[in-house]
Each structure stands twice: as structure tokens, then as C-alpha cells.
Image (tube, rainbow, N blue to C red):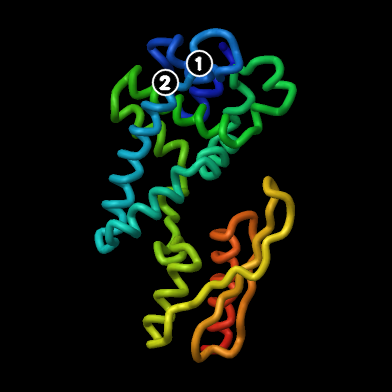
Amino acid sequence: MDKAKTWLKSTLDYDFDDPGLFEQALTHRSASGESNERLEYLGDAVLDVVVSEFVFRALPGADEGDLSRLRASLVNDASLASIAADLGLGEYLILGSGERKSGGHRRESILADALEALFGAVYLDAGFEAARRAIEKSFGDRLESLPDPGELRDPKTRLQELLQGRGLSLPEYALVEVTGKAHRQRFEVSCAVDGVEAETLGFGSSRRNAEQQAAERMLEQLTDVKQ
């Protein structure tokens, strides 16, 4: 644990008063000892509060939907795993032998959960403000370079808003074809809009995903037409 403590001090400038909390935060359920699952539960809640407050203050004109989308873009597994990887957290995780051999220290869900567990451990060790500082250090520029909330809306929502803004009819989605076996189906969906000559197709492992892709392609069509 000495290397892990040195790493934590150099990356987040933090020392645990209770080293047991730090060790627990690093311990995956595949390893012996108390796992980080309870700490991950707590850290998830602390992280939500910190990020929610940050985006609330950073974007005073944003509505609830935009704030929720911004928060979700910052605290989803992919984002947290990327942060954990950048910090080098995976190198210090305590994993069972099977999980370690299969590359568990690079697995997105394991990295994300461990980072949240670390925030939960800091919260228990030194309180909310210490956890806030650890979170802000971990996120770095990500909190300063927030994306445009509009860009976070899913393609179907953006397409609907665009069409309404232009006074056009809402899109119609139709299932074209389903191929593959039951556990690996591939859906093909069309998207059509009255008054727009082109029809777009989308493909995905679910009908919803296929509809989103078809909507994205229709958005591209309409943007090209406008230009």
C-alpha cells in the first residue's frame, strides 16, 4: 500500500487518517477482504452533489433537463473510467487473480466504481469539503470545459425540436427489417419527414438504437439542406 499512498498524495494531494478506508476503496469484490461496493454507493451520492452544484452554478440559465444531461455526461461510467485511467488508479486496484489476469484493472466498470469508492472513502475520512477537493482535482479541466447542453440531447429529441422550429411534421419511424438470432438481433429502421424528400436508415442492436441513428442521419440531411 505504500506505493498507492504515494500515488494518492502526488495525484490528489491527500493522505488518509484511516488507511483501512483507502485499502477498502481499492478492493474489488473479486479479492479477499471487504470490497469497495459500499464505499462506491456512498461516493456516487457525494459525486452527484458536487457535480450537480458545480453545473448549477456554472450555468445559471440552464433548465433542469440541461443540468441533468450535463451531470450525466460527467458522471457516467465512461467518463469516470477515463478519469480513473488518466489518474493511473487501475495500477493500484486490489483484484482477485482471475480478474487481474483478464485485465480487470482496465475494465471500465471496475475503474468507475473504484473512483467513486475513493471519493466515498475520502468523505468518511475527512468530510464533504475534502471529498469535494478530491473530486475537483480528479476532474481537472473537465469541469471548466462543459459541453453545450444542446449537444447532449439525443438525436431523436434534437430532430423533433428542429422540425418543430421549422414548422414541419414530426418524424415517422418504421421498422424495416430484423435480422440475426434472438440474442444477437440487428434492427433496421427508417425515418421519414413530410416535406423532406430523403428518407434515412438506421441500424442497431435494438430498435431504439436504430431509431437514434436514423434520426441522426436525418439531422445531417436537414442541416445540409439548410446550408
Q: Kindly report the distance in space between the C-alpha atoms of the residues bearing marks 2 and 1.
A: 8 Å
Q: Residue at x 46, y 48 (%)?
A: 141
Residue 124 x %, y % = 33, 19
User: On the rendered structure, is 188 left or right of 82?
Assistant: right
Image spot of residue 19 (x, y percent): 45, 10
Q: Is residue 89 above or below residue 172?
A: above
Q: Nearer the viewer, residue 148 or 100?
A: 100
> Between residues 100 and 169, which one lies in front from this camera angle?
169
Task: Tell me the amino acid under the disc marked 2.
Answer: Arg
Q: Position of residue 46 (x, y in %)?
A: 34, 32
Looking at the picture, does residue 51 appear above or below residue 88? below
**Where does label 2 land, which residue?**
38
Q: Is residue 78 left or right of residue 202?
A: left
Horizontal arrangement in the rendering, residue 111 relative to residue 156 (left or right) = right
Q: Residue at x 55, y 44 (%)?
A: 78
- Look at mark 1 in the image and give the residue it sits on: 35
In the rendering, at what x and y percent does residue 110 appear?
57, 30
Amino acid on which the number 1 mark rests in the picture:
Ser
Say which element carries label 1. loop
Q: Quadrant of residue 131?
A: top left
